[in-house]
Image: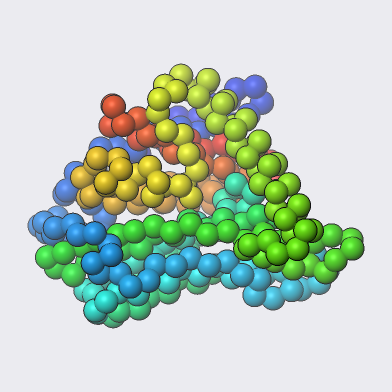
Amino acid sequence: MVKKWIFLFLGLFLGLFLMPAASAADASFFEKHENPSYEEPDHHFSKTTGTITIHHILDNDEYVLESKGTLKTKSPAEKQQVQMILLEDGYVKDSAAAWLEGDDHLTALKRTPSEDSGRYDLAGFYSMKNAPVYTFDWSSSSLYVLDTPISDLHSFTLADSEEEKKAGKMMDTIINQQQQHVKRFIRDSAGLSESSRLFPITRWKQYMSPSVSGLDPRAVEKAWQDVYYTVEDVTASRRKQRKKVMPFVNWNKEQKRLSLFIHYSST
């Protein structure tokens, strides 16, 4: 079970969730008696893609986003899974998951109402098991939505016009400044080592893939599941209190210690 502590410092709400050590018997994608072997995702996946688009514009500043995570395997798999977390300006906006058995193509899809300008990031997780083998991978994608008095509401992933370049740079700067402030607060409050990694969940693959973290693949898969469901549960509970959440993962490679910090802010 994940242990939870809630702290209040300097008017900021911060939750610390210590991820339990993952054992082979507890790994979420497998039965207790199973002992499959891990292989690199390139051997089995032909596509792992996350996308965010505007599905429908409701009026001048309201719209519906469509988040999609697509997994294609090179042959039908015994089990497939896709999980997604959608973030708006660094805060969790929505999440979705899908499972399938005996197929080579799985898509998770979620439509989410939103409004005004913003940057959306999608963290995607893809896994499959085809005994005696299993594998998994992650993706990260972004969408900028621009709504100004002098232009119609539109979106872009890569800026083309000068207006888009300036708007995208401004959004990135504001989000980065806010995240740096929260990260500094987390490090100071929790006494984290400067050598440890503190990062948003969109950068999970960069720091936590088995080849980088040095962890057993089963432990990495279990840790992701713990983080995903904790973020999902905390987001739902805080939303009832009109709060939004900004998650960060801390990985201390020397101590093999993984922690999840969640910053709360009023909506």
Instruction: Look at the image and tell me whether residue 209 can be seen.
Output: yes
Residue, x 89% and y 61% (percent of image)?
149
Residue 169 place in picture, x, y as percent: 70, 49
Q: Residue at x 61, y 70 (%)?
A: 53
Tell me residue 101's x, y (percent). Answer: 27, 76
Against 42, residue 174 (above or below) is: above
Where residue 221 sits: x, y (%)? 29, 51
Q: Which colour scheme is used?
A: rainbow
Determine if residue 115 is in view: no
The correct choice, above or below, for 128 with respect to 120 in the image is below
Which quadrant holds the N terminus? Answer: top left
Q: In this view, does 2 lie above or below 235?
A: above
Q: Residue at x 65, y 43 (%)?
A: 175
Q: Which residue is drawn at 65% across and 36% down?
A: 178
Q: In this view, does 59 lie to the left or right of 190?
A: right
109 displayed left or right of 22:
right
